[in-house]
Image: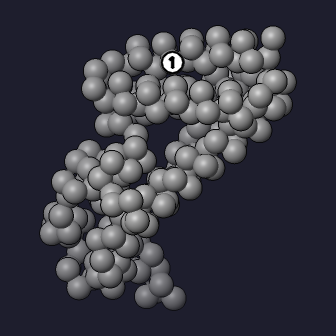
Amino acid sequence: MATKTRRTTTEERILRTAAGLFYAHGLRGVGIDQVIAESGVAKSTLYVHFRTKDELIAAYLRRTDDSWMAQLQDAAARAGDRPAEQIVGLFDALLDAFDRHGFFGCPFVSAAVEAPLDSEARAITVRHTERRHAWLTALAAGAGAVDPAALARQVGLLVDGALASGRLLQDRAVVDEAKAAARALVAQHTA
């Protein structure tokens, strides 16, 4: 049992270190040696848990997908019980992220730009976008949108745009503007 606990703790430390590095510097901007040095594990230990950098990137993206979806859903839930409120409220997750560490952009957009089209990293980014779209579509349907999928796509574009503009400008006002645009879209689609 101690081996399993140690392995889990070590794997968690590697993933946490890699996540911080990938988020701040991009997938290509981080080498395995940097992950090893900053996580404090031996090279052989890292390779026990992740045979390749691609495996480490995939684990990071899967973990980020779960974490980011949970943050979006939590922010939406805090906005109230009505789906229309939740669609607008989800933008508070972006504000929370900015307040924690500034904007480094969307890890999925960054990964999609850096990863080859046929890579597992890109496939995970596509699945994240599809997962987010399905959730937004369900919220839009609950809000009474005439075309829930269209509203979901538009809100998804606002999220991605706010993250990209936030990265460029380092200004949380872009999220406030995206949130206001989402409010207008919800009103337009549910009128």
From the viewer's perspective, is 30 left or right of 121? left
Place of residue 84 in the rendered image (x, y in percent of width and height, measured from the top left): 75, 22
Q: Secondary structure at mark 1?
A: helix
Q: Quadrant of residue 183?
A: top right
Q: Residue at x 20, y 80 (%)?
A: 43
Quadrant where the C terminus sits is top right
Q: Residue at x 61, y 18 (%)?
A: 182
Query: In which image quadrant can residue 81 be found?
Result: top right
* Vertical order, 190 against 36 (above or below): above
Question: Which residue was labeled with disc 1?
Answer: 178
Position of 90 with respect to 27 (left or right) is right
Above or below, 86 against 107 in this view is above
Q: Tell which of 20 and 126 is nearer to you.
A: 126
The residue drawn where x is 73% and y is 12% is 187
**Residue 70 appears in the rendering:** no
Q: What colour scheme does the image use?
A: one colour
Dot 1 amino acid type: Ala
How many numbered marks, from 0 up?
1
